[in-house]
Amino acid sequence: MRRRFLQESRTHLELLGSEDYGEREAKPAQRKRGFEAPYGTLREPICHLEPRLSTSVPNANLKMILSKIDANLKKIRVRIAAAAGRADRNPESVTLVAVTKYAEPAWVQALFDLGHRDFGENRPQQLARRAGEFPSEIHWHLIGHLQRNKVGLVLPATTRIHSVDSLRLLKRIGESSLKAGATRSVLLEVNVSGEAAKDGLSPSELRELWPQFCEQSGVQIDGLMTMAPHTDDPESTRATFRGLRALRDQLAESSQGEQPLPELSMGMSGDFEVAIEEGATLIRVGSSLYEGLSPP
């Protein structure tokens, strides 16, 4: 039933062919790269079809879902561009990872149909399941805690793991990747704020173990990830994001160019603009994408 629902939702979202919502297929080369529509725009509409009736999701609801997510995505793109501009950065240097932990299947499909390709899941089991339910062009990022006994579950479906928080976990990922004949992109999770409730290596622990991290095979350490303290004042998160960037610079320098660590995964719905100003290349946004929507 779940797969049938997804197929029907996908069909109807694709057929929302009004002037605002129809979309042209990405060119093959763009699809291969994981094409996203330009900032604040949709791909050009080419059809004017009426959606067919659905027994699972009312037609009006599908239109409303696509309309609201389209508007939310555009607003976020504008905010990304503004934050990048304040830091004298190209907005294209920032990848928006759409967090789908609490997203309904039709919401995920709407984002895909609007051209989005990078999605993040917190739960390994849900990532593995959704990777089999949605189009293969999606780049799935694991952004939540990963236990070593779940590594084999997520590796086949995951583009990047953001939450490597121990040397033992990195070794397990490397061993499993080598068995599969591949190298896995990972980010090391760092608890910059020092909060006891948060996962992640402490900055001092990572500095001490850095040579051992660099020795592991089967993995490509592409950068660092952190979560700032929850707060109503985004500006108060700046020290955390700045601390991660400084740590990255120290580690990259100590590796003498062998580990440049180009990626910084930091910033969520409430603080991603500050994170971009401090160098974020990956932002993890969920609730802002789904404003105005509620589960059925």
Image (cartoon, rainbow, N blue to C red):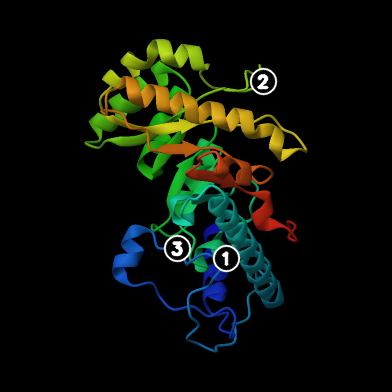
Q: Quadrant location of residue 70? A: bottom right
> What's the distance in space between the residues labelled 2 and 3, CA to CA?
35 Å
User: Badge 3 is on which residue?
Assistant: 36
Identified at 61% across, 65% down, the residue is: 74
Residue 269, horizontal then vertical, whole percent: 66, 46
**Horizontal placement of 247 versus 262: left or right?**
right
Mark number, residue 110: 1
Q: Secondary structure at mark 2?
A: loop
User: Badge 2 is on which residue?
Assistant: 197
User: What residue type is disc 1 on?
Assistant: Ala
- Residue at the left extreme of this rendering: 181
Q: Earlier in the sequence, mark 2 or mark 3?
A: 3
Identified at 47% across, 12% down, the residue is: 205
Q: Which of the two discs, 1 and 3, sits closer to the camera? A: 3
User: What residue type is disc 2 on?
Assistant: Ala
Q: Earlier in the sequence, mark 1 or mark 3?
A: 3
